Image (cartoon, helix red, strand yellow):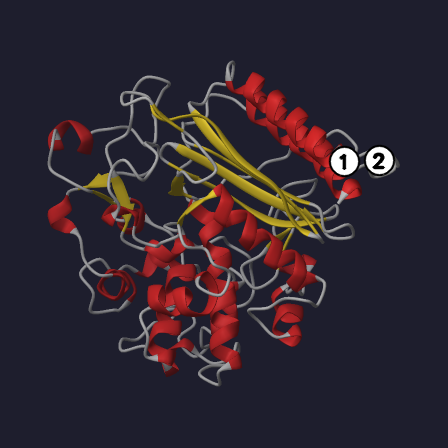
Amino acid sequence: MMPFRKVLIAFVILTFVSCNTATKPNENDALVQELTDSLVFLSKTADFNGFGVAVVGPQGVLYTNGFGMADMSKGIPYTERTVQPIASISKTFIGLAVLKAQELGKLKLDDPVSKFLPFPVVNPHHPQLPITVRHLVTHTSTLLDKENYLFRSWILRDTANLAQNLALDIGECRFSAPTTAVSMEEFLRRYLSPDGPWYSDSAFADLKPGERFDYSNIGATLAALVVEKATGMPFDAFTKRYILDPLEMRSSTWHGENLAATAISCLYRTRTEAFPRYYCATYPDGGMVTSSSDFGKYMAELVRGYRGEGTILSKASYTEYFREQLADSNFVDRATGPFTDEHNMGITIGFDSVVHFGHTGGDPGLFSMFFVERETGLGRYMIANTDMEGWEHHKQVWELLGRYAVKLGAVR
């Protein structure tokens, strides 16, 4: 079980092989069918109940689909329009929102967060050094995810079987009762403000802000609150106006707890046992709920943005979003290899040490990842609705998507 809203992946991926076959009128349809048939086959033996996929290139969305079951008990299939939380991939939206707020003149990346917040957030070990917005979105803020984050952020939707569900093993984390829910702002105040009931000096690393990379869910959520305070708009409304609506991501929301049970995939502990419905109190760090169809649109926009052709941010803002912000000195044990998002950071977007940008995610009952090859603009995404028992079946899907990304990109 992954204790945080992300996972690190270091697969050995099969090398892409260029496809030089001349384009034919029906070649794309044939490739799409081949990929679909292969994924249907894999879905029959996979150790997860349902999963969604997307493939993109510089031309746009090349493929989206869903396989397996979204709800085993009701016989609801998992399709490209099935929605589910994407866990820590959600943080990539925070970076876009921060840069959009900067474009609007509401904040600057190097502003101290105290300029915007209604309560103080100061590292008690270095009170004279301000924590900045840039520190939050590059995971160098010194804010740590301690027990009061891990035990309070995941909120059950209802009280059915409450005692049993509160006792469920979800790694280092815990589910909390519906009656404990507070707003995102109040959660952050209680955790980070010296007068907050959950406050502890141990929630701050004994390092200087900006000195060291240390992945921080609570820091990312604080960046979302800064956007709220700087713009005067709730974070969910701001991202809907400036990201979701322009990209026509009509199935996407930060508030999956408000969806009908039939609209959102179940999340499974095992192939036969579903987790109870839950949501994130600190929703910006892991609570985006979307479909493979919508995420394909989002990933295609990131490809355009990387190439200086994006539509929701200016070229200058995208340059900053994708600029590698950190150096060797910011890491103790720097991640290397393909498909890890912790070798370097842009503005909430991760980079591996090979050729990709992207992000990964993990929460109770789900796994997600997307990565784009920088030079070619070919990207792939997969998400599964079941706790991970191993990597082999995920790897089979991931490698298949990689091979067909090359083929479909060549045809298009």
Identity of the residue drawn at 46% across and 69% down? 242
Residue at image mark 1: 407
Element marked by disc 2: loop
Q: Position of residue 403 (x, y in %)?
A: 73, 32
Residue at image mark 2: 19
Identity of the residue drawn at 74% across and 48% down? 355
Cβ atoms at labels 1 and 2 below 8 Å apart: yes
Identity of the residue drawn at 40% across and 52% down? 252
Amino acid at the residue labelled 2: Cys
Point out the residue furthest to the top here.
45
Q: Position of residue 284 (x, y in %)?
A: 38, 57
Above or below residue 107? Residue 2 is above
Q: In the displayed structure, does residue 167 sit left or right of residue 291?
A: left
Q: Residues within 10 Å of mark 2 (few under 14, many from 20)?
A: some
Amino acid at the residue labelled 1: Lys
CA distance separating discs 1 and 2: 6 Å
State the image quarter where residue 229 is shown.
bottom left
Q: In the displayed structure, does residue 330 sit left or right of residue 200?
A: right
